Image (cartoon, helix red, strand yellow):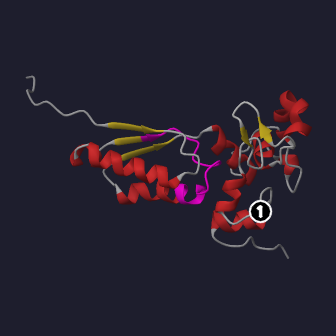
């Protein structure tokens, strides 16, 4: 027997390219809350399309906000996709899964290594190309396509380093402290 009960479709919200601008993200979130009825908003599927970091000054606050959503909105479904900036950030801090030959990822773009100032500090030998590009220091400071200055690297990553209180291009213990909340254990 067919049911005559109709179910209201779930509201789907898509948010993309936050790029470290927490104020814009919070303004958007507030606007969504005020324009979507409360029941629909509280049960929505919210899909974040990636590019949470770089360019803006508050990557850390953006990440903290995103991490808090499942606790603050437990009836929503949250989907967090990885953008190219997030992938590059992950490649630099070493959170990509294993199973790739780092140097093989460099080959296709090697002609750009000097111009883009790829990262050559601690651990670069095992780093995916995008991590090296992300943490590098671009030689030509002006982006003629956008008409703006680069912020540290081809990915404009300097504000992300700043938001974590870490100098641009630094690796090692500073990132370990932020990612894992402690210092790495020294081997005896």
The residue singled out by tag 1 in the image is 167
In the visual, does 84 lie left or right of 187? Answer: left
Estimate the x, y position of residue 90 in percent, counting from the top left.
68, 48
Spot occupied by residue 35 in the image (x, y as percentages of width and height)? 27, 43
Q: How many marks?
A: 1
In the displayed structure, does residue 41 sit left or right of residue 77?
A: left
Residue 18 in the image: above or below residue 59 = above
Q: Which residues are magenta?
A: 47-63
- The foreground one among 105 and 143 is 143
Question: Residue 25, percent across and down?
Answer: 46, 50
Could you tell me which quadrant the N terminus lies in?
top left
Quarter of the view holding residue 32: top left
- Asked if residue 57 lies in the magenta stretch, the reply is yes
Q: Residue at x 71, y 64 (%)?
A: 176
Task: Depth check: give the residue in front, 9 or 16.
Answer: 16
Q: Residue furthest front?
A: 147
Q: Position of residue 177 (x, y in %)?
A: 69, 68
Is 37 placed left or right of 174 in the picture?
Answer: left
Can you tell which quarter of the image residue 61 is in?
A: bottom right
Secondary structure of the residue carrying numbered label 1: loop
- Image quarter where the C terminus lies is bottom right
CA neighbours of label 1 inside 10 A, class few (<14), some (14 to 19), many (20+): some
Name the residue: 79% across, 60% down.
171
Of all residues, the one furthest to the bottom in this rendering is 188
Tell me which residue sits at (30%, 49%) in the image.
33
């Amino acid at each position: 027997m067919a049911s005559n009960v109709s179910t209201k479709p779930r509201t789907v919200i898509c948010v993309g390219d936050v790029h470290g601008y927490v104020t814009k993200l919070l303004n958007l979130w507030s606007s969504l809350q005020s324009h979507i009825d409360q029941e629909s908003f509280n049960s929505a599927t919210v899909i974040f399309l990636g590019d949470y970091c770089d360019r803006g000054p508050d990557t850390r606050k953006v990440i903290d906000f995103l991490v808090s959503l499942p606790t603050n909105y437990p009836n929503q479904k949250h989907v967090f996709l990885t953008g190219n900036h997030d992938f590059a950030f992950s490649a630099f801090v070493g959170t990509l899964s294993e199973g790739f030959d780092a140097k093989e990822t460099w080959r296709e773009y090697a002609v750009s290594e000097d111009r883009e100032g790829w990262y050559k500090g601690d651990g670069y030998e095992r780093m995916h190309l995008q991590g090296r590009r992300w943490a590098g220091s671009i030689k030509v400071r002006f982006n003629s396509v956008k008409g703006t200055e680069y912020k540290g690297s081809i990915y404009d990553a300097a504000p992300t380093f700043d938001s974590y209180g870490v100098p641009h291009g630094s690796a090692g213990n500073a990132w370990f402290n932020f990612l894992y909340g402690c210092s790495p254990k020294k081997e005896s």
